[in-house]
């Protein structure tokens, strides 16, 4: 891990609506993106949102890779999405396990749209339209929620869908 600290549940920044980025080319924004990419890589995380490192700005990272629960998840190098928006989504929702660096020690079964069509700017400032499905759609929606001041606990259908990480890992094997 580098020196950036992860904000945890209870920190009010996680409950704020993040500000859009107006000048993506600004050195401090480019540096922040670099820090987020590095932190995602070093923590082997699947995603990260700027509020989690104390910056209330609309930047998220997605970095899918295969894992025990989702062995067919695509391998992606960490990618920055700036000012992301959901354009449309599937009617279908699917439930799947999520955890969060800002909510340590817990896992929840969370319903998410199976497909989302999104727009965002890349770090060069180009406008991108892209569809994400399945696990990558889940990562996107989890990180997008962080930009709206939400965490995955807010999406629980029932407290019965909430496990401690220790119990989750025990039941996985
Ligand atoms: Ni999270």
Image: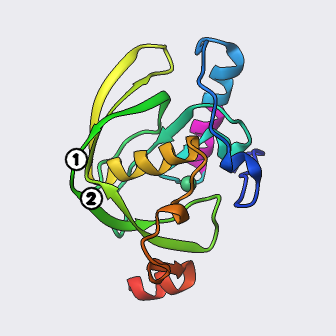
**In terms of image quadrants, where is residue 41?**
top right
- Residue at 73%, 52% (x, y): give it: 7
Q: Is residue 113 magenta?
A: no
Position in image of residue 25 (x %, y %): 60, 11
Q: Is residue 36 magenta?
A: yes
Badge number at residue 90: 1
Q: Vertical placement of 17 versus 83: above or below? A: below
Position in image of residue 172 (x %, y %): 39, 82
Callout 2 environment at 10 Å: few (<14), some (14 to 19), or many (20+)? some
Q: Which quadrant of the frame does ligand 1 lie within?
A: bottom right
Callout 1 environment at 10 Å: few (<14), some (14 to 19), or many (20+)? few
Q: Is residue 137 left or right of residue 41?
A: left
- Label 1 beta carbon within 8 A of ligand 1: no
Helix, strand or loop at disc 1?
Answer: loop
Residue annotated with mark 2: 93
**How did the renderer colour the structure?**
rainbow
Q: Vertical placement of 70 versus 147: above or below? A: below
- Residue at 47%, 39% (x, y): give it: 78
Q: Is residue 71 visible?
A: no
Position in image of residue 44 (x %, y %): 53, 54
User: Which image quarter holds the C terminus?
Assistant: bottom left
- Please report the bounds of the magenta region as a residue range: 34-42
Q: CA distance from mark 2 to mark 1?
A: 7 Å
Q: Is residue 132 visible?
A: yes
Q: Vertical placement of 1 versus 166: above or below? A: above
- Whether tag 2 and tag 1 are in contact, CB under 8 A, the answer is yes
Position in image of residue 100 (x %, y %): 56, 60
């Amino acid at each position: 891990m580098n020196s950036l600290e992860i904000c945890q549940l209870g920190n009010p920044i996680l409950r704020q609506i993040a500000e859009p980025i107006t000048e993506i080319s600004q050195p401090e924004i480019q540096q922040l993106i670099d820090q987020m990419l590095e932190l995602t890589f070093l923590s082997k995380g699947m995603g990260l949102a700027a509020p989690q490192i104390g910056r209330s700005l609309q930047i998220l990272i997605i970095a899918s890779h295969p894992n025990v629960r989702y062995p067919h998840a695509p391998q992606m190098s960490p990618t920055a999405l700036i000012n992301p928006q959901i354009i449309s989504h599937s009617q279908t929702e699917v439930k799947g396990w999520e955890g969060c660096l800002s909510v340590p020690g817990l896992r929840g079964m969370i319903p998410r749209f199976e497909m989302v069509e999104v727009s965002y700017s890349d770090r060069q400032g180009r406008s991108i339209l892209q569809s994400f499905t399945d696990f990558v759609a889940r990562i996107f929606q989890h990180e997008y929620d962080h930009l709206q001041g939400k965490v995955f606990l807010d999406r629980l259908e029932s407290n019965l869908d909430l496990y401690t990480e220790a119990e989750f890992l025990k039941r996985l094997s």
